[in-house]
Image: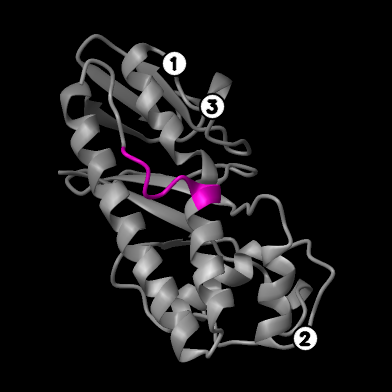
Amino acid sequence: MITMQAVVEVPNFDFEPPQPWPVLPAEPYSFVPIHRGCSDAEVGLFVSGLTRGLETTGSRDEVVTALLAEETLLQPGGLRLTDTVTGAVIEPGCCAGLEEWREWVDVLTGTPPWLGHGPTPEVEIGVDELRVWQDSGADRQAAQSVVVERSSLPGLLNRVHRDLVGFLACVQAWSERGRLGSKGTDLVEAIDRSFHVTAPLIFPGS
């Protein structure tokens, strides 16, 4: 069975200012799935990932205010593919961003997405199948890969879409418990806008 999940990269908090909210304890630079059942600590981890590079530190309210001043929110991560039979896992490379997740739709018209580097994941587009490699170039044959039926890709992406829409509700609930008021609603809207969450997911020929 092939699964596809939206994932975000865990920041290395040794190099980040103190966080104004609880975050999920996880190995730096590993990947954490984003879905409709995320805990407050997982939401906190996601929002902390958005703050990387911001100069502002301080209270929850101050950090969210600084986030809302950004034109676009970015989040290292992307989509993770897993073959539950072979155990092969394909994760985003460095510098890939969750905000680019919809580029996977373009695979159906022959345009592979850019999935990061170091390693450099690559989508090999066939007539009926897609083979997704964890690395490309000279390292491709030594890297693991996952085979996806082209006809199954819309279903996989639709599940990712539902997970991301459900995650927005988790962010709203997190902000309400944190008493962020209207700034919490504004944060949900900013995440929706930056990560193209609630817009319809349209496939070629549909």
Q: Earlier in the sequence, mark 1 or mark 3?
A: 1
Residue 188 at x, y = what percent? 49, 65
Q: Where is residue 86 shown, x and y percent of the image?
A: 22, 43
- Seen as rendered, the residue at the extreme top is 127
Which residue is found at the position 26% from the left and 29% from the top?
A: 147
Total label count? 3
Q: Residue furthest right?
A: 55
How far is the residue under mark 2 from the one under mark 1?
A: 43 Å
In the image, what residue occupies the spot 59% across and 75% down?
183
Q: Is residue 175 left or right of residue 14?
A: left
Magenta region? 193-200
77 is higher (above) or lower (below) than 120: below
Q: Closer to the N terminus: mark 2 or mark 1? A: 2
Q: Is residue 133 visible?
A: no
Which of marks 3 and 2 precedes in the sequence? 2
Contact (Cβ within 8 Å) of mark 1 with mark 3: no
- Cα distance, mark 1 to mark 3? 22 Å
The C terminus: image quadrant: top left
Between label 1 and label 3, give the one nearer the viewer.
1
Indicate the secondary structure of the residue bearing disc 2: loop
Residue bearing mark 1: 111
Where residue 33 appears, x then y in whole percent? 39, 61
Point out the frontmost of discs 2 and 3.
2
The mark found on residue 58 in the picture is 2
Q: CA distance from mark 2 to mark 3?
A: 44 Å
Which residue is at 62% across, 44% downward? Answer: 94
Q: Is residue 18 visible?
A: yes
Which residue is the site of mark 3? 139
Crowding near the residue tagged with mark 2, few <14, some 14–19, many ≥20 C-alpha atoms within 10 Å? few
Kind of residue at disc 1: Thr
Image colouring: one colour
Q: Is residue 17 above or below residue 116?
A: below
